[in-house]
Image (spheres, rainbow, N blue to C red):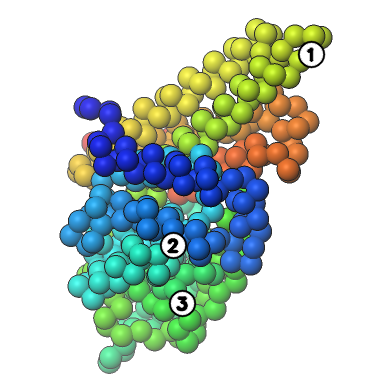
Amino acid sequence: MDFNLSDDRRMLKESLSRFLQDRYGFETRNEIAGSEQGFSRELWTQMAELGLIGAMLPEEVGGFGGEGFDVMTVMEELGRAIVVEPVLPTAVLGAGVLADAGSNSQKALLEKVISGELLLAFAHGEPQSRYSLSDITCQAEKTDDNWVLDGQKAVVLNGDTADKIIVSARTSGTDDEEDGLTLFLIDADARGVSRRGYATVDGGRAAEITLEDVAVGVDAVIGEPGKAFPVIEEAIGRGILAVCAEALGAMDVAKDMTLEFLQTRKQFGVPLGKFQVLQHRMVEMCLEIEQARSATILAAGRMKEDRATRETALSAAKNLVGRSARLVAEESIQMHGGIGMTWEYALPHFAKRLTMIDHLFGDADHHLERFAALSQAS
């Protein structure tokens, strides 16, 4: 396998890197994260113009990428700046679902998504479901001309700022069955939809969404009714790859900040980096990051393969990245000492994002168990 970036991906990576260095400094990022919306519409539009969203989607729906390595290229750069704009919920999760299973009219909306005009959210998780993708109690009942949705969705990423929301609901079967799940595309301000937005600990935004007698037409259904589980699993798989790549970028920055600190901070007249025990800890961090990178590259290369191969690689990557992210976050803070806990310093913000990434879409322990189950079944 050739691990070198293609010319298009290299150009995108370099353009995005320059843009973030010029326009998305740490102070700017914190100011944006603390704003009412939690992101900058102006910068979001500029990112779209750079091709950030289009790179996540295949050519047949107006994009110019859509492969695992396209997602990895973009998200790793975003991780270096801990970007708070809604790339994950809009470009990876929401747009990915529409590209995979949407009707022609639904796919037509992707033009506005790619241009940065339309924001999406993927409302799947519920208060009781934790990491289970099939534990869905939100109900959708068919009437003569409509579907009526009732239920609650929890921790919907950027759910309070999205223009349209993709909602999963049970149309048949029991609460934990894979069969019987259906996806719906609804307006965020539709009658019966209420949203409670809040800031997350890592600077992002999420929302609790309640659906009460929300009536939508039959054209709101995404794909085949009752057969949405594979689409949901693939969407979450893209999300796993995306946050793994994002973590790589964030870990690289945390590692570099720690190394610079050890080389410049002195104790007893010598740099901290001269102490062998700290050298060993830095080496362990570097090894963990490279192992996580290898697992993420493998997962990116297997996104188009059969389900068992794809999901096994994704769980392996998420487990390794989760463990590595925790270690890098903890070791970086500890080796910095008191300054590592200072809010005005960038490092703790990277540590918070790395901690959150471990819990998104299943933590390291969950994916270790899932990897074992998938390996035994294959």
What residue is rendered at 27% in x and 28% in y? Answer: 3
In the picture provided, is 209 more to the left or to the right than 331?
Answer: left
Tell me the tag on residue 267. 1
Mark 1 vs mark 2: in front: 2
Q: Residues within 10 Å of mark 2 (few under 14, many from 20)?
A: some
Tell me the tag on residue 112. none
Whole-Å distance between the Cαs marked 3 and 2? 20 Å
Whole-Å distance between the Cαs marked 1 and 2? 47 Å
Mark 3 vs mark 1: in front: 1
Residues under numbered marks 3 and 2 in contact, where contact means CB atoms less than 8 Å apart? no
**Which quarter of the picture shows residue 165?**
bottom left
Reading the chain from its start, which is encountered first: label 3 or label 2?
Answer: 2
For label 1, the SS is strand
What residue is rendered at 45% in x and 83% in y? Answer: 190
Residue tagged 3: 188
Q: Amino acid at mark 2?
A: Thr
What residue is rendered at 65% in x and 36% in y? Answer: 347
In the picture provided, is 350 more to the left or to the right than 62?
Answer: right
Position above or below: 277 against 237: above
